[in-house]
Structure formats: structure tokens, C-alpha cells
Image (tube, helix red, strand yellow):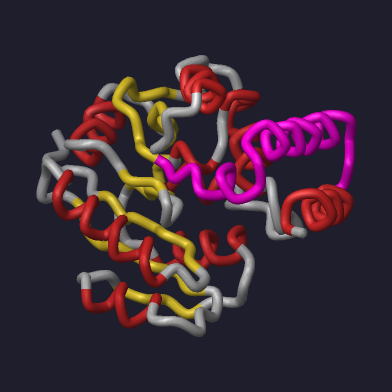
Amino acid sequence: MSTHQPTISIIIPVLNEEKYIKDVLFAISTNAGSNRIKEILVVDGGSTDRTVANAQKHGATVINSNKGRAKQMNLGAAQATGDVLYFLHVDSLPPKDFDSDILNEIDRGFEVGCFQMRFNSNSLFLQFFSWCTKINHQICRGGDQSLFITSKLFHELNGFNENYVIYEDNEFIRRVYKLKPFKIISSAITTSARRYEERGTVRLQYHFGMIHLKHHLGAKPKELYQYYLKHIAA
């Protein structure tokens, strides 16, 4: 009988996030409940601020990458040595004992899943969308909820599709749902509402909904990115 205990590699893609990288690394160290986090890999897409210095100062290993979240996460996964990959956005803070929760689900036979999510906002509108993350359907998934997956399954799925400049999480999770049971852990990750506050809550959610719809109707990655540039990034 094997006595090997699975370990976790945390992968965080970043680009010019000098403030948030400190916050998330502090949350990881404060909320970890096991000694089985093997490494924290911060995959930098060419930051020009103090992101890299701050990541190194707070104990992470920095990997230099070409820009693009799918590319960055795939590179992190390729260099990771843990049994479980945990993809985390820089502005999403994991809950207490997040690593123990992940490992418990792995022990129970789940190979992939995420946490529920809440925004750091009192907006009732955003609270509704936070509540939706309880629902185990791919339409309710997104990268802000983070993602744990065995390294084996990740590589069987050939990782993130690098043609997607945006929507790479959703496209990947859609493939996962077709293959494996997906576990939603009941504790919640806390994610920043900064993009909603900057661009308008209802307006931004509408445009995210349109991107979901366009993808469902067969839009190609380039078309999704052009829509994003026009309506969200502008």
C-alpha cells in the first residue's frame, strides 16, 4: 500500500500586480493548514513594476514567461513538481485551510474542482453572482474561483488552450466537465471586485454574459478577444 501523500503546486499568473501579489502570498501563508504545499510558482508575463521582487521577497519562485494567462499557467504546470496543481488568480484570496480542503477531496477521489467565491463588496448584485458559484454547472464556473486539478489529469487534457487570450479558464473547465466529476468545495475564496467597481457592475457582468453566449454559439478565440477589447478593456 502506497504511503505517498500528494503535494500541491500553487501557480499564480501575474502581470504588473505588485500590490496584489503581496496580499495573495500573505493569505496563502496565513491560511495554509498542512505542510504539503510543495511550491508557489509565480509566473510573470513581463512585469515592469515590483511584482517579481515582491513575489521573491515573500517566498515564491518566479518563472519568466511570455505574456498571456493560458501560456503562463501552462508554463507553470510544466515546471511544477507537485501531484496537484492549484491555479490561483492574484486578486483571489484562498480561505482558511484551503490546502487541507483540496487534499481531502483528492483523497476522496475527486481529481478536479474549485471553491465557492465571494466578492469583497457589499453589492447585492455581486452577492447574487457569488451565490451562483454554489451551483455545479459549467456556466457558473470561472477562474476567480481558483482551480485544483491533479497534474496527471491536467496533462491528459493538454492544459489550457493558448489560442484563448481571454476565457481560457472557462474553455478548459468545459472540457473537464465532459470527462470528470467536478467538486465545489463549500468554503469560499474572496476575490476583488475592483474590475466591477472600475467599469460598472451591471455593465461588466452584461459583457461577460455576452462572451459566454458568443462562445456557446461557436465564436472563435479571436472574436471573443476582440469583443473583450472593445467592451471591457477599453
Left/right placement of residue 47 relative to residue 100 reads right
Would you say residue 210 sits in the magenta stretch?
yes
Give residue 43's quadrant in the image: bottom left
Identify the main secondary structure in magenta.
helix
Give residue 173's quadrant in the image: top right
Q: x, y percentage for residue 182? A: 48, 24
Left/right placement of residue 101 relative to residue 226 reads left
Give residue 176's quadrant in the image: top right
Give the residue displayed 11% in from the left and 44% down from the top: 34
Q: Is residue 122 above or below residue 151?
A: above
Give the residue displayed 56% in from the left and 45% down from the top: 197
Q: Is residue 119 above or below residue 30?
A: above
Looking at the rendering, the stretch of residues picked out in magenta corresponds to 191-220
| Quarter of the rendering occupied by the C terminus | bottom right
126, 181: nearer the viewer: 126
Q: x, y percentage for residue 185? A: 34, 24
| Residue 219 visible in the displayed image | yes
Q: Report the number of discs.
A: 0
208, 5: nearer the viewer: 208
Q: x, y percentage for residue 169? A: 60, 44
Give the residue displayed 32% in from the left and 20% down from the top: 186
Q: Is residue 121 above or below residue 110?
A: below
| Residue 181 visible in the displayed image | no
| Quarter of the rendering occupied by the N terminus | top left
Give the residue displayed 60% in from the left and 50% down from the top: 198
206, 162: nearer the viewer: 206
Would you say residue 170 sits in the magenta stretch?
no
Q: x, y percentage for residue 220? A: 87, 47
